[in-house]
Amino acid sequence: MLLAVATLALAGCTGGGDADVVVAPVGRATVVEVVEAPATVAARATATLSSPADGTVAELRVHEGQQVRTGQVLLRVESPSARRDLRQAQEADARAVAAGATSGPTVDLSAARQADAVARRSFARARRAAERITVPAARRQALSALRVSQAQYRSARAQADDAARQLAAGIGSLSQAVAALSSAQRVQTRAAVQLARRTVSALVIRAPVAGTVSLSPPSSSTSGGGAQALISQLPEGLQSQAGSVLGGSGSGSSSSVAGALAEGQPVSSGEALLTVTDASTLSLTAQVDETDVLLVRAGVPATAELDAVPDATYDSAVESVDPTPTQSSRGGVTYLVRLRLGLGRQADGTSAPTPRPGMSAVVDLRVRTARHVLAVPAAAVFRDGRRDAVWVVDHGVARERVVRLGAQGKTHVQVLEGVRLGDSIVAHGADQVHDGDSVS
């Protein structure tokens, strides 16, 4: 333990006041360094589902607060525009097949032009949905996946254009040029059909996770919006990639429905419809400042205090630290730290209530614990330029001593170098002392 001695008067002070300092011997103590960070209670999974196309809610199969299972049909959107796009894409594909089967010297280019029109509309809907994602990183990744899809389509379109140029220039045999053009056009029209068919299929919206339904989606989200519309419209090879990037099918939204969702309600592409929340297990997401995050690692113990339950503490532990930084509300750089949330206890020892997703909290992360180490009061340490120092009282005279610190607690700090056990130091009032001052 650190033993404080009587308060001594500081001789030689200027200003005529009775400046007091506290002198104490260097002792041993257990020092716990704590990093404090704001946090939010998070559900195991939250998916805010959005409309894949413009239309109306034709059928609503769930009600507020209903428990649903993964894959259960929640609602159906009727979209004449999406079905029209599919029909036009199929007609264009059929014409491309018919043109490829003929041996004539020309190829019908109207199928390719119609496929282009359908693809442009589908890609535009997907882009609108992606741009509604509120989380910057998720929005960038979703738009990147969409660009890959468009690049694949442009490649097929370029093949068709090359074949047409060869035919016009008379390069190679006529039959070879016609066959190449027909093949490229078929690739293009098949891609347009696949894109339109996926949009129509997504009009039947299913639960991506098991949980509780809310028919009034939040006005803002931590997961990003329009993901269901985006994923449903990507080519088959990119859907799994986009789903993993966005944290699950249709997770999050950036817009909200005014009031509870109802049948007959008009909806637009990417508009949030309802939310499914799996609160079977709860966790915490904390924002740790860049100056402290290097001390945080998986397994670090912590305690959490909720604004909603001010007299209770909840045990928790760090599970992961995100490598990607984010901008805090105050303009600084923070890192997202995820913690497991355990049981809580009230001040009287009784069990604390179970929190709800979205509640605000403050977590104390015990990043370093040094047991029975050389320690001084935190108030004894001051900065001298880029160095930490203390005032050592030697034969009644204060002398500056540079120290190297270890764990830094709220009341005491560990000293690795600079002082020895039993040395007398100025434990309080260090800002009133100068080198060479007499302490009597």
Image (cartoon, helix red, strand yellow):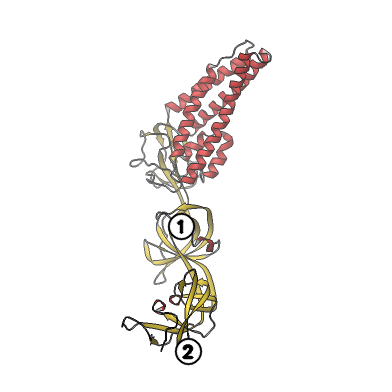
Q: Secondary structure at mark 1?
A: strand
> Hey, which residue is sitting farthest top in the picture?
104
Percent from the top left, x then y, of residue 20?
A: 36, 83
Q: Are marks 2 and 1 in contact (CB under 8 Å)?
A: no
Location of residue 234 with respect to 164 vertically, above or below: below
Residue position marked by numbered label 1 in the rendering: 287
* 310 displayed left or right of 288: left
Percent from the top left, x then y, of residue 331?
A: 41, 54
Going by the numbered disc 1, the residue's amino acid type is Gln
Percent from the top left, x then y, of residue 80?
A: 42, 26
Percent from the top left, x then y, of residue 309?
A: 37, 63
Q: Secondary structure at mark 2?
A: loop
Sequence-earlier tag: 2 or 1: 1
Q: Residue at x 42, y 29 (%)?
A: 79
Foreground: disc 2 or disc 1: 2
Going by the numbered disc 2, the residue's amino acid type is His
Residue position marked by numbered label 2 in the rendering: 395
Q: Residues within 10 Å of mark 2 (few under 14, many from 20)?
A: few
Q: Nearer the viewer, residue 393 or 235?
A: 393
Q: Nearer the viewer, residue 295 or 267?
A: 295
Q: Nearer the viewer, residue 413 or 34?
A: 413
